[in-house]
Image (spheres, rainbow, N blue to C red):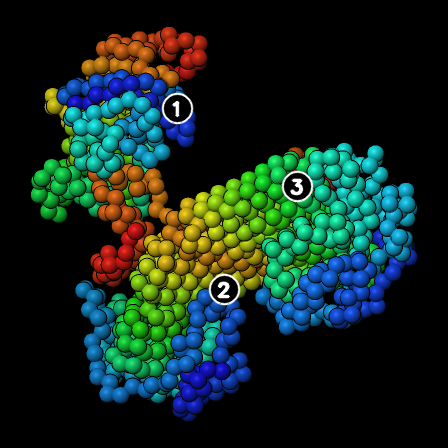
Amino acid sequence: MSQWLNQVIEHASVPSDFLATVRQQSRETLQQQGWPGRRAESWRFTPLTSVAKREVKSATDVTAQHAPEIDGLNAIELVFVDGKLTTDCDKLEVPDGVLIATFDNLSEAEQQRAAKVFGQVKPEHHVFGLVNDVASEQGVFIDVADNVTLEKVIRITNLVSQDVDAHTRVAVNIGENASARIVEHAQGDTPSMTTAFVEYMIGDNAHLEHYRFALMAGQAKQIGGSHFALHNGSTLNSTIVGYGSELSRLDVDIIHRGEHADAKMNAVYLLAQGELFDLHSNIEHTQPNGTTEENARGIIGDNARAVFNGRIHIHRDAQKTLAELNNRNLLLSRKGLINTKPELEIYADDVKCAHGATVAEIDEEALYYLLTRGISRSKALVILNFGFIQELVNQVPDDAIREWLLPKLSERFTRMEVK
Amino acid sequence: MSEQSEQIDRALERKYDAGFYSDIESETFENGLDESVIRRISAMKNEPEWMLDWRLKAYHAWLEMDEPEWAHVHYPKIDFQAVSYYSAPKSMKDKPQSLDEVDPELLRTYEKLGIPLHEQEMLAGVAVDAVFDSVSVVTTFRSKLEEAGVIFCPISEAIQKYPELVKKYIGSVVPRSDNFYAALNCAVFTDGSFVYIPKGVRCPMELSTYFRINQENTGQFERTLIVAEEGSYVSYLEGCTAPQRDENQLHAAVVELVAMDDAQIKYSTVQNWYPGDENGKGGIYNFVTKRGICHTNAKISWTQVETGSAVTWKYPSCILKGDNSVGEFYSVALTRGRQQADTGTKMIHIGKNTRSTIISKGISAGRSNNAYRGLVSMGPKADGARNFTECDSLLIGDTCGAHTFPYIESRNPTAIVEHEATTSKVSDDQLFLCQQRGMDPEKAVSMIVNGFCKEVFKELPMEFAVEAGKLLEISLEGSVG
Amino acid sequence: MLKIQNLHASVEDKTIIKGLDLEVKPGEVHAIMGPNGAGKSTLGYVLSGRDGYEVNEGTATFNNQDLLDMDVEERAQSGLFLAFQYPVEIPGVSNMEFMKESVNAIREKQGKESLTAAEFLKKAKEACKQVQLPLAFLKRGVNEGFSGGEKKRNEIMQMILLQPTLAILDESDSGLDVDALQVVADGVNSQRDGERSFIVVTHYQRLLDYIKPDFVHILADGKIVKSGDASLAQEVEKNGYAFLGKKYEESEV
């Protein structure tokens, strides 16, 4: 056990709401399984000692803040500051057929729908997921009714402004044939400890365009997850952008619970001096005829550490699955470190699955081509390195987000040391 | 299940030809392990004090260690007190000086396995060390090898005759407390082969060790040490079988390879321990630690064809310490019935411009599980190092599993690592094509599987390639009709 | 402008160029023909300074500077352009961004001001039209998913934008149909102004129907074995490389 975990369990005042049973169970599971040991596979390359020894700190004087500006993004904004929801959901302009409300403000029917999402998608034993079950006080439920196409983007922003423990939770239900776009955005660099988990239930033939920007930096410890359950014929297009910080860990689960679902995920991570970013993705195909394509690319600068674990798990019944995962990394410095592990676990024979992982230097031929065009070596390296990331950013479906992201990443990249 | 899948399934029903037991009077220790057992083993082998000390240190380290649980294999906890740690044919006690003095029943055993030990009958060009339970029975062609300066003898004999060499290198690649099974091996190893190739010598023939477990409830803990001095070359082959029994038996070997500057070691294994029956009863637990170290410009190449054992836990590895050194790993692992394999390699790149290649072919059938597990590590000084890894899995039927767990770690911006993995099946289209061209399904499956493994088979020495091909064919031979 | 004397060059310890002499004056177009394996592409790589191509002997000066002493990008900045036979794809880097970087690097060296985005875009669009590529190609990744012909035209577009003093075209005709060949040739001819020089490396004579050379050289086994005017190309067209001896008799033209 860790001091921090003990304090979290002690401090947690589990609300006696409709989720009380689930939360209580999580509390018990936490007490039973305890703190991950040194050999725990899922934390093998990401030491948790700094969290284990931490003192739990609760927020004081939280003031509302605006979400970071994204030009041209027409969004319904939900903002958490230091773990407190500062948006008044009642005042949001929400189209018909869409519900955005805190857990304590749901009708019985809404509670039933929310209960089908909360704790039902994320993995059972993720220690911080369980912590979040127990310690997240004010969760939000987003419900998009059947057949509704939500034009506006919903953005969930997590900001930290002080040394605080903050646990935020959102449950999302997207009805049959519905379509939505959701952005999860985290920023801040105070020496905080945040967990942010969002679970998505994507109904039959529904579509979700998803973004997660895990952009906390500096001394912030950010741990979180985006977890998707896909039902028959549903589609998911997800873009993940990760910065490193003292400790930055993101778990993404894509679970095909229905047939003929299609998931695509692109992830990029840019790690500057001394940062750590750990991306664990888990793709579960439990039903036949699903497809998944995942591309993750990262650039690791001076002293930075990247951890990537990409698992594809094809269950016995998931015949005719197509699943591909590709992870590519560029290491810019001798002091950087990359640990990558693409995993395949396959129990069905009539499937096409492949994964690849590379850690590589710049393509010499491409470099030569740029040099013959008179571009200096150092500039050519920047262009090629960034091109490697840009290739994925160019696939971002939303114009405003893409236009916002490119210069932002480019600026971060130019600050990273290139050999 | 389609008709064709059924055909494949039948084609895979498999005989285990090496499952007989030889009725040979043996001296076998009572079950159990403590310090006195280790002292007795050491005494039986007439070992010097330092060797006993070394064993006891390993034993105490082992007592503190936990059995590894990270592999993708499941089996009941082993009771290490229910195993006998020494068994040898009584006839071996007086150390026969020549083949004529060896118990004919022993020689018949090897003949039945297709390994005649009379030199005139043997494949010319292959010298054999035959290890039966805990002792080496005979080593052939020794005088011919001695002419070239090559030492090829049981390790128990090397400890007596060449103590400096053994002392210098034993445990230098796989440290005593490297892992649970290696530590156990260090404490209780009974025999195995020792090979020493002097500077600049190209070993004039293939060297081979054939391991046979015969006695019930015994574990086999052999230890192999190969030292190739500067600029030398050796190709070494290893084969293994065991009788068919309902109880599981333990095999925990350690192999250490030392390739000095410019030396080359080619190590090939055809592993055919008894795999257990259709329902998973019996079979060998094969927990093996194999590792080699490459100095400057040296090369170590591991090739393995793994078809046997109930559970395989094995990762032949290379420490690429010297600049420009090369490591290779070529593997075919076939699992069927209830077999479980978790095998792969580690390539540790330390020196500059080191290169490694990993080609792994896993074939899963029946209710088996077959996993590749590997590590490629690029150290901070491994400038310009390269790795290429390809892991392909072939699934036959929908009740088996194929898994890939590659760990990649890089600390060097100039190193390049490439890993690719795919899965496929023997498709109905492929089968149909072969049948339409007049082949029976059994032949077709065997041909397709052989094609899938081709990249690995071509790495085997010719004599072994034939054996491996036959082994797969037997595995795929069935009652299609 | 370019003067090569007794050039010997090797790749991976294998000598490919074995004593080559060539002088190109301003405004001239030199065609270099030869059988497969003669060292035609190697010459372009050696002159542009590709890694791994070692010069073992001889000299090459470009506008009175020692060409062999310069880095790849310096050679480009001094006005040497190589149109690749197989241009590499660079996913993620847009053609536009890439060419703008290139044009401005060269302008900087010439002491000219960088082009603004708008100025560059105007020039790029013109060049793009000239080689008959859709404007959308400017936004795509460098050569990413381009057909063989599109890649060749993209090379010519870059040449037009960069305004080199010497352009080496390495088999810019290979794999092109007649229409594409015309586009490539027109692009080159539009740049002939009496000052700019060209080295046209080709296996076939047909490109020379479109780009009239002043000189034709036959390169065989790393040396120029025969030089002449355009009629030499016709001769090769008719009789093949048989005159080089038995070794090349089979070589197709």
How far apart, in angstroms, are the residues tagged by discs 3 and 2? 52 Å
The circle on residue A284 is 2
How many neighbours does mark 2 have within 10 angstroms: few (below 14), some (14-19), or many (20 or more)? many
Give the residue at mark 1: C15
Task: Say which quarter of the image contains residue B462.
Answer: top right
- Secondary structure found at label 2: strand
Task: Give x and y (percent) for residue C108.
Answer: 13, 41
Can residue B333 be seen in the rendering of this structure? yes
Above or below, A118 against A149 in this view is: below
Discs 3, 1 touching: Cβ within 8 Å: no
Which amino acid, mark 2? Answer: Glu
The residue carrying mark 3 is: B197
The amino acid pointed to by label 1 is Thr
For the residues labelled 3 and 1, the Cα–Cα distance comes to 39 Å
A260 versus A37 height, above or below: above
In the picture, measured across the screen, residue A337 lies left or right of residue C143, that is: right
